[in-house]
Image (spheres, rainbow, N blue to C red):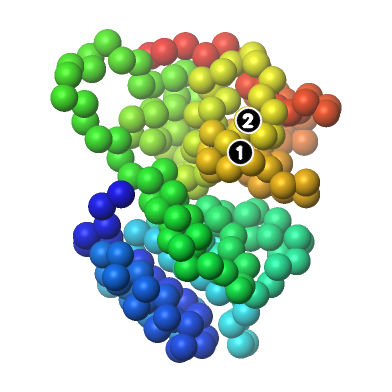
């Protein structure tokens, strides 16, 4: 993908790491801002909002998860956690607070670049087709929800937008494009992240939980996205093209 003018922010308390990442990403056409505290990141978000933030969790005297929540509450941007905290619980919490991806240190720079580009692709608006697309159905309706796949927006019954992360949106699209069909975790991970699930990968389960909290009237008794034990998940309501 082309990267000119794409602004990234790197938050880490170690200048050596931010300089390494900034230098490497700059060679691939990104404009990179280096920050070393949560307050510095928030000031940057207010003055020159980046399209994607690389966030370290291990910041002295600061809660990295709280910074991630603040980003999700106030800005629509990509969020990739890059941290030395590789515990599975931390990964689940990171995904719970809205991270689009979670990378543990030490990491391979080319892999990190690929993950950044994958998140940015999911965030990017679709490229207009050269041919007329008037017949294409890009708005899907189910229950009281309207999913605009072209504009990447989810609207409730009152027409108000509900904020979704890139991963949540892609997951809901995959389910809505296969209504009534049980989709395995491997299928969903491949269609939303472009990779296979590891033996303890809970990415899909975490995102399903977040989606349910946003679209179900009772997330503990879901009626829209149901679990099928040992098989995966299914979108239950009828889906119609608007």
Asked whether the residues under the numbered discs 1 and 2 touch, taking CB atoms below 8 Å apart as contact, a structural biologist would say yes
Q: Give the secondary structure at mark 1.
A: helix
- Residue 52 visible? The answer is yes
Callout 2: few (<14), some (14-19), or many (20+) C-alpha neighbours within 10 Å?
Answer: some
- Compared to 63, does 223 lie above or below? above
Image mark for residue 187: 2
Describe residue 197's horizontal placement relative to residue 13 as left or right.
Answer: right
Residue 238: name its quadrant: top right
Nearer the observer, 110 or 80: 110
- Compared to 150, does 40 lie above or below? below
Q: Name the residue under label 1.
A: 189
Please provide percent x and percent y for residue 106: 61, 74
Nearer the observer, 56 or 240: 56
Q: Quadrant of the C terminus?
A: top left
Please provide percent x and percent y for residue 31: 27, 69
Residue 90: name its quadrant: bottom right
- Residue 64 visible? The answer is no
Please provide percent x and percent y for residue 125: 30, 40
């Amino acid at each position: 993908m082309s990267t000119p003018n794409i602004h990234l922010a790197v938050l880490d308390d170690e200048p050596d790491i931010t300089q390494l990442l900034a230098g490497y990403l700059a060679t691939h056409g990104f404009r990179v801002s280096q920050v070393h505290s949560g307050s510095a990141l928030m000031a940057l978000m207010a003055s020159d909002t980046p399209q994607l933030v690389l966030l370290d969790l291990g910041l002295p005297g600061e809660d990295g998860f709280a910074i991630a929540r603040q980003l999700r509450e106030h800005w629509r941007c990509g969020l990739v956690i890059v941290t030395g905290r590789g515990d599975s619980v931390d990964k689940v919490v990171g995904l719970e607070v809205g991270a689009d991806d979670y990378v543990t240190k030490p990491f391979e720079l080319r892999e990190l670049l690929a993950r950044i580009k994958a998140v940015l692709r999911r965030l990017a608006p679709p490229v207009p087709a050269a041919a007329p697309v008037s017949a294409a159905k890009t708005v899907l309706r189910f229950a009281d929800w309207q999913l605009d796949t072209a504009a990447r927006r989810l609207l409730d019954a009152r027409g108000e937008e509900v904020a979704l992360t890139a991963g949540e949106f892609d997951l809901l699209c995959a389910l809505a494009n296969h209504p009534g069909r049980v989709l395995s975790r491997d299928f969903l991970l491949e269609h939303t992240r472009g990779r296979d699930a590891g033996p303890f990968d809970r990415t899909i389960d975490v995102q399903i939980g977040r989606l349910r909290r946003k679209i179900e009237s009772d997330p503990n008794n879901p009626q829209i996205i149901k679990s099928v034990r040992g098989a995966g998940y299914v979108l239950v309501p009828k889906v119609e093209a608007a």
